[in-house]
Image: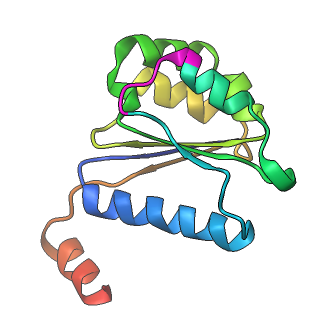
């Protein structure tokens, strides 16, 4: 599964990431199968991490922040998207900017069971006030 959290509202993006990780830890008590990818991983690093099996039959959670900013890595992810999405692990990509539209379209073509894309736009005016009250 691939989860992409992106957009200019870094605060809400980070909140959502923390919420997903907390949900994973609640479901998988050991919490040892969470891997935060290095700041600028190579595709081979990503592939190696995604191939490793989790302990105790748990899915592994791979978290990458702003790795789609790297053109070469983004291109390789796009080419191998189906195999990454259909694997046993969960790949979360948190991006501070809007993701490339071609990549987004390719991700959206995959099964809804294999992907989730959520954009966090900057809140302004009424939307910002409503969010503030809710918080």
Image side of residue 49 versus residue 21, left or right: right
Q: Position of residue 115 (x, y in %)?
A: 64, 42
Magenta-highlighted residues: 39-44
123 relative to 99, above or below: below
Q: Can I make out residue 69 in this image?
A: yes
**Residue positioned 27% across, 54% down in the render:** 121
Q: Can I make out residue 100 in this image?
A: no
Magenta segment, prevailing SS (helix, strand or loop) = loop
100 relative to 63, above or below: above
Of residue 116 and residue 126, the one placed in the foreground of this image is: 116
**Residue positioned 35% across, 19% down in the render:** 70
68 relative to 119, above or below: above
Quarter of the image containing the N terminus?
top right
Furthest-left residue in view? 125
Image side of residue 133 versus residue 4, left or right: left
**Residue positioned 59% across, 12% down in the render:** 79
Q: Position of residue 105 (x, y in %)?
A: 52, 28
Figure coloring: rainbow
Q: Position of residue 131 (x, y in %)?
A: 27, 78
Of residue 120 and residue 17, the one placed in the foreground of this image is: 17
Furthest-bottom residue in view? 133
């Amino acid at each position: 599964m691939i989860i992409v959290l992106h957009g200019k509202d870094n605060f809400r993006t980070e909140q959502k990431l923390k919420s997903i990780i907390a949900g994973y830890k609640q479901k998988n008590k050991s919490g040892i199968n969470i891997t935060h990818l290095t700041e600028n991983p190579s595709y081979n690093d990503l592939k190696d991490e995604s191939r490793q099996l989790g302990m105790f039959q748990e899915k592994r959670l791979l978290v990458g922040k702003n790795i789609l900013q790297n053109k070469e890595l983004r291109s390789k992810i796009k080419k191998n998207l189906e195999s990454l999405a259909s694997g046993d692990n969960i790949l979360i990509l948190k991006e501070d900017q809007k993701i490339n539209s071609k990549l987004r379209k390719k991700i959206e073509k995959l099964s809804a069971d294999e992907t989730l894309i959520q954009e966090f736009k900057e809140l302004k005016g009424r939307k910002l006030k409503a969010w503030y009250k809710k918080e």
